[in-house]
Image: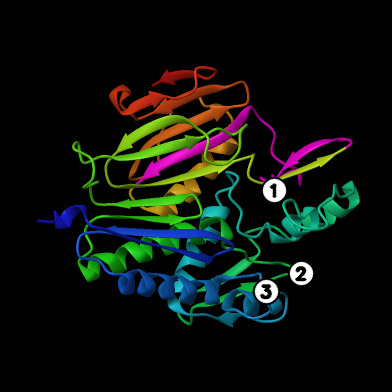
Amino acid sequence: MENLSHRKVQKAYRGLGTNITLSAFGSATTTDLDDSFLLLQQFEDKLTVNRSQSELMSVNNSAGIKPVSVSDSTYHLAKLAILTSQQGFGFNALIGPLVKLWKIGFSGAHVPTDTEIKAKLQLIDPTQVELNDQDFSIFLKKPGMQLDLGAIAKGYIADRIQDLWQAKGISNGIINLGGNLLLKGNAPHHVDRKWRIGIQDPFAKRGAAILSVKTGPCSAVTSGIYERLLKTSTGTYHHILDSLTGYPHENNLASVTVFSKESVMAEIETTRLFFKDDPTATYEPLTDIFGVIFVTKDKKIITHGLQSQDLTLLDDSFELSIN
């Protein structure tokens, strides 16, 4: 007789500019997965800035002209992103004009001039946004400003898919939005009921892991400088731009992985920790953060909040430090 808890249904999709895989255990069906992807598409339709029309594009097209009312879900996500951006720790949902100037990871990528960068820095100030909680409106005060929620949209959507699964009675599964992982419930196919997550080698092709992590239900989000690069005769530039300088933020970190209750908070925390620069400093996590893994350019792996018995080093060329 089949062990229903071990029964797995899985399906791959393409959305949010990446490859998506949804896997659920138990009595879940492919229709459940299709419903989940439909939900993702509905959010993408509202939040994308890579099409001519969306709720966010309406906001951006009205920059310096008028406020634009959006749906409540878009408004509350935008408000979270804007208020977080105003804290000034590196996360900036208004950085779009600077990103589009560099185009790192896209056709036409180049190193801009200092003059071009200084001009864009005038358009990425998150304090120059008006939020109206009464009519869910957003107003970008200066023409040319752009609101881009790409830095947290995957996490937000993963959380909403988990809500849908909860409503459908799906207890265990994996929501993989292009490397942004949300692990719901326990892993029924492992005796210890823990999921296995591989930490990507920043210096190798995708899929090469340097560390295996055993974990319970959580979201795992990684931010790394290896994801998009611009290589020129003057140097190599990654895509994590600093709102203060207009250039890629330079430090000794290759990647930061955060384990959290909510995926959207993991998205924010990876950025905060990347800009803190020092992985050995005393770690004071945001709410519901379970653990952190830093990988440095000189091949050190530094962990916080994780247990040694749950960590297995897979590449001896890296040095593991557990805090």
**What whole-number distance in Å separates the C-alpha atoms at marks 2 and 1?**
16 Å
Q: Name the residue at 24% across, 65% down.
A: 166
Residue, far front: 1
The residue wearing badge 1 is 243
The residue wearing badge 2 is 144
Q: Is residue 266 left or right of residue 102?
A: left
Give the camera-side residue of 246 and 6. Answer: 6
Q: Are marks 2 and 1 in contact (CB under 8 Å)?
A: no
Q: Earlier in the sequence, mark 2 or mark 1?
A: 2
Q: Is residue 33 left or right of residue 301?
A: left
**Secondary structure category for the residue under label 2:** loop
Q: Quadrant of residue 27?
A: bottom left
Magenta stretch holds residue 245 = yes
What kind of residue is marked 2?
Gly
The residue wearing badge 3 is 60
Is residue 222 positioned above or below 18 on the image? above
Stretch in magenta: 233-260
Magenta stretch holds residue 197 = no
What kind of residue is marked 3?
Asn
